[in-house]
């Protein structure tokens, strides 16, 4: 029986599913190439006339999933400043693009560019570990920043240990606690505090306040393209759906700002103390006006500089310290008013 040619073609495809997978694989490869090509076109367009690449001896990629915060802008500024001293061009992968690259795509781009090293603020540890190992297998050294991936092949880590960070917050809790302090709630950013990080932080915090009759409550704030559930968590506290804490610890810039604004708007600033993270203009205003007790931060520009130093040390000597600690700084009202700290840009 005669059949149309199109039908015969369709039947052949259905009869050979391997051809479908081959075609799908080819299409994915083409899309990936187009993605990379589009990025390089935009990068070239963005930098034409501004950067003389021939004047640089090294090319360093810096990658993070939090490029929109003032904290990260300062980290990048410090890295660029340090890179200039080594004759290194520091490129923030995906800078200037509307849609962010995933961590996997960003590292693949850095590998494709044959960069001399990667500075990485790690996100989800399991997937990031695979990508770090992939970069190292291409002889590209990796320095992790702020959050470590100790089980990977990364060459070094620059930041603060989560256990020590928990101790820092514990000491501040003891400083402001009184005989009526019973509950401390910790708001973890889900994107940057994985299970391991949360465990170490909890241990450092609990060991510091363990002799006091203070209970600890830990909650995860999830981010969905810039929107988080901090408002829902604070709403539950304000409405009595959960026990209202005496102190709230916020572990990133966005959660700190969201929490203090919600507490201010709901008139709870007199009964709940907020200990925040990092420095921004909004956070400093919150401290000055008494809505935030204090903030604990590391110097972001120093972290950027020290990360470049660690990478270049490895490039030159093929060895580097396993862990480089960045000092923390507590900014309270007195210090915020004096402006005696690295200003947020």
Image: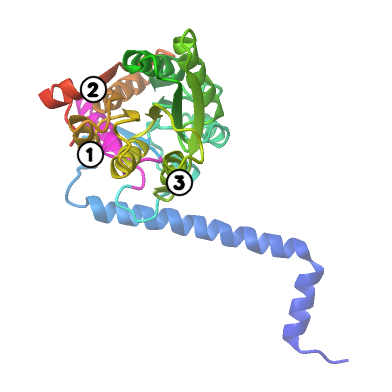
Packing grade of label 1 (10 A; few <14, some 14-19, many >=20) is some
Q: Based on the picture, tell me whether residue 76 belongs to the magenta stretch.
A: yes
From the top left corner, tell me how far across and down residue 188 is, in percent.
46, 32
Of the two numbered discs 3 and 1 on the same chain, state the one appearing first in sequence.
3
Identify the magenta region.
65-94
Badge 2 marks a residue whose secondary structure is strand
With 254 as the anchor, is 150 left or right in this view?
right
Of the two numbered discs 1 and 2 on the same chain, state the one appearing first in sequence.
1
Disc ID at residue 282 = 1
Disc ID at residue 331 = 2
Q: Which residue is painted at 43% across and 29% down in the image?
A: 245
Q: Which residue is painted at 46% across and 10% down in the image?
A: 212
* The image quarter in which residue 182 lies: top left
Residue 143 or residue 331, whichever sits in front: 331
With 4 as the anchor, is 158 left or right in this view?
left
Looking at this rendering, what residue extends furthest in the top direction? 211
Disc ID at residue 232 = 3
Is residue 184 depicted above or below 91 in this figure? above
Residue 160 or residue 182, whichever sits in front: 182
Badge 1 marks a residue whose secondary structure is helix
Residue 152 at least partly seen: no
- The CA distance from mark 2 to mark 3 is 27 Å
Q: Which residue is painted at 41% across and 25% down in the image?
A: 143
Looking at this rendering, what residue extends furthest in the right direction? 1
Is residue 113 depicted above or below 160 in this figure? below
- The CA distance from mark 3 to mark 1 is 21 Å
Residue 334 or residue 327, whichever sits in front: 334
Of the two numbered discs 2 and 3 on the same chain, state the one appearing first in sequence.
3
With 295 as the anchor, is 51 left or right in this view?
left
């Amino acid at each position: 029986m005669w059949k149309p040619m199109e039908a015969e073609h369709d039947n052949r495809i259905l009869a050979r599913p391997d051809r479908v997978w081959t075609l799908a694989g080819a299409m994915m490869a083409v899309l990936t190439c187009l993605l990379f090509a589009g990025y390089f076109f935009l990068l070239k367009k963005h930098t034409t006339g501004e950067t003389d690449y021939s004047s640089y001896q090294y090319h360093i990629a810096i990658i993070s999933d939090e490029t929109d915060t003032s904290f990260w802008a300062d980290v990048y500024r410090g890295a660029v400043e340090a890179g200039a001293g080594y004759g290194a061009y520091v490129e923030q992968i995906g800078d200037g693009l509307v849609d962010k690259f995933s961590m996997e795509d960003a590292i693949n781009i850095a590998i494709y560019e044959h960069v001399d090293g990667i500075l990485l603020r790690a996100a989800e540890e399991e997937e990031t570990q695979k990508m770090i190992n992939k970069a190292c297998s291409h002889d590209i050294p990796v320095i992790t920043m702020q959050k470590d991936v100790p089980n990977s092949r990364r060459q070094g880590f620059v930041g603060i240990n989560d256990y020590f960070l928990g101790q820092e917050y514990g000491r501040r809790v003891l400083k402001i606690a009184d005989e009526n302090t019973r509950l401390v709630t910790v708001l973890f950013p889900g994107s940057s505090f994985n299970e391991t990080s949360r465990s170490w932080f909890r241990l450092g915090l609990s060991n510091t306040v363990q002799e006091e009759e203070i209970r600890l409550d830990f909650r995860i704030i999830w981010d969905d393209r810039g929107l988080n559930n901090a408002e829902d968590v604070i709403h539950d506290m304000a409405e009595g759906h959960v026990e209202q804490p005496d102190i709230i610890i916020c572990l990133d810039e966005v959660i700190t700002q969201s929490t203090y604004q919600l507490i201010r708007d709901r008139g709870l600033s007199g009964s709940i103390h907020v200990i925040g993270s990092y420095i921004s203009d909004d956070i400093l205003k919150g401290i000055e006006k008494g809505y935030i007790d204090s903030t604990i931060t590391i110097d972001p520009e120093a972290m950027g500089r020290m990360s470049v130093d660690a990478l270049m040390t490895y490039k030159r000597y093929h060895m580097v310290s396993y862990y480089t600690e960045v000092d923390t700084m507590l900014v309270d009202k007195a210090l915020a008013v004096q402006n005696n700290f690295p200003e947020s840009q």
